[in-house]
Image (cartoon, helix red, strand yellow):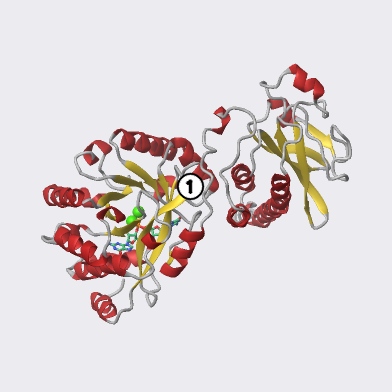
Amino acid sequence: MPLDHDIRAALTAGEFELHYQPLVDLRTGTFSSVEALLRWPRWAGEISDVIDVAEQSDLILDLGAWVLERALAEPGRWHGCETPAPPFVVCVNVSTRQLVRPGFVTEVARLLAATGTEPAQLGLEITETALADPVEPVVAALTELRELGVQSCIDDFGTGHASLTYLAKFPVDVVKIDSSFVVGLGRDAASEVIVRSVIDMAHALQMTVVAEGVETLGQLEFLLDAGCDVAQGFLFSRPVPRPVGTEIVANAVPWPVEFAGRHARPRGRQPLPAVAPSRRYRLMLDLARDVTGRLDLADVLSSSFVALRQLVHFTGGSIQLVEDARLRLAATDPPATPEALTASIPLGQGVGGQITTTGEPRYLPDITLAPEVSPGQRARSVSGGVRSYFGVPLITAGEVIGVLQIDSLEVDAFAEEDRVTVLAFTPILAAAVQNARLFARERTPYLLPLPRQDPET
Ligand code: C2E
Ligand code: CA
Ligand code: CA
């Protein structure tokens, strides 16, 4: 743990810095706020240890005042970048000691006026544990902040003991679901239930819900489906120095967020939000980084579909992998029929033949048999199946390891741009699949049972 004395000296010497992590508004896909996070470059440990030590004394008041002033006063104001309505919000963490100190709200008002910041451009985050007693001064300060027009947010929600009904007693506008629940999305049913119910109840209380610690596309997809309002996490951006942050916010590709509830989407092609090509490539790089960063095959496959859904519209898709010289379905979206899942075809055959040599592979039967397709359409389809298709072999080191197939109800389903996107995505997917397989193989020796030692006789 750092020493109180060293922290104070560092504050005086100007050694502290602020980094900023952009948050994405899931209704628009754009960055709508940033959270200011304290950094002490000389300190190799966790910043939360520094905060903990500072909170033991009035040191947190000085440190907190510095953070607030810095967050509002630094040059290169966020508000200067395209200022959409509603305003871009800078969120600052405040400790309860700061919050309940007499004069805190007056000081906030003074800083806002001095820096020409609208109250609605500031958000203050208070951890859930701060809602424990004494309650009155906290409620009083939050009420004053609301009257001033400053947003307040309950941070780390779910880690303390506050229930949402208890929360309703506090005049707060935003609830931040703790990252420990976000981690469990897609893995742990309890986390999923908690996240969904927090979102529903917070909405019933007219609060905005933020999910923090979003690291994967799968988690994002769950949150979109659950109706979460805002997301924060390494998937979108790490906390970065201010100049980097303003650049990220100004040049961001809007995250296509309307793919939630996609299974209910009316069929037919719907345009993705208009995104300039250069920005689209950036988005693709972000998605590629996420997909190739995974080391678990199931994760790679499911992340790939989420990534693809953000890049191109398709009604169905499958990833087929080579196993013992046969192709088998490894992942599909929407889910495949049971027959398709058990089917496998020898390499080089496929419905249209020559699956790996022409670069135009065919699909396994049935995955594409969508109930909504009429017999007429079925009869007209070249493939004898239902949908037209676009399949690309997955190749690593000259070896075909599988096929990525995208299906669409339209015969000429893909605009040139979409084709290029799918083609560009394929090597990324191939590399990620190969990585995950190698990793699994490398891990194997550690998973093998240790040789048994016969008890000495
Ligand atoms: P917090 O308020 O919950 O801040 C979010 C923390 O999660 C940050 O850690 C951030 O870097 C991290 N984070 C963001 N996205 C991800 C992600 O996708 N995955 C993972 N694994 N982590 C993610 P950081 O910066 O180390 O801050 C830790 C805590 O220290 C903060 O938690 C906050 O409670 C406290 N803190 C930081 N700056 C201040 C400050 O200026 N004042 C006060 N009072 N507390 C602060
Ligand atoms: Ca926070
Ligand atoms: Ca938090």
Residue at 33%, 70% (x, y): give it.
Answer: 74
Circle 1 packing at 10 Å, graded few (<14), some (14-19), many (20+), is some
Q: Quadrant of residue 288?
A: bottom right
Left or right of 277? Residue 217 is: left
Q: Relative to 149, is 156 on the left or the right?
A: right
Q: Is 34 placed left or right of 451 in the picture?
A: left
Q: Residue 174 placed where, x, y %?
A: 30, 46
Considering depth in this image, is 238 or 389 the residue closer to the camera? 389
Residue 457 in sight here: no
Image position of 336 with respect to 102: above or below:
above
Disc 1 is placed on an element classified as loop
Q: Percent from the top left, x then y, of residue 87?
A: 35, 52
User: Which quadrant holds residue 169?
Assistant: top left
Give the residue pinned by disc 1.
Answer: 29
Instruction: Give me the residue at 36% from left, 34% from top.
Output: 200
Instruction: Residue 181 in the image: state x and y as whole percent.
Output: 41, 45
Quarter of the image that includes the N terminus: bottom left
The image quadrant where one finds the C terminus is bottom right
Give the residue at x 21% y 63%: 113
Q: Quadrant of ligand 2?
A: bottom left
Is residue 40 at all visible to an observer of this figure? Answer: yes
| Amino acid residing under circle 1 | Gly
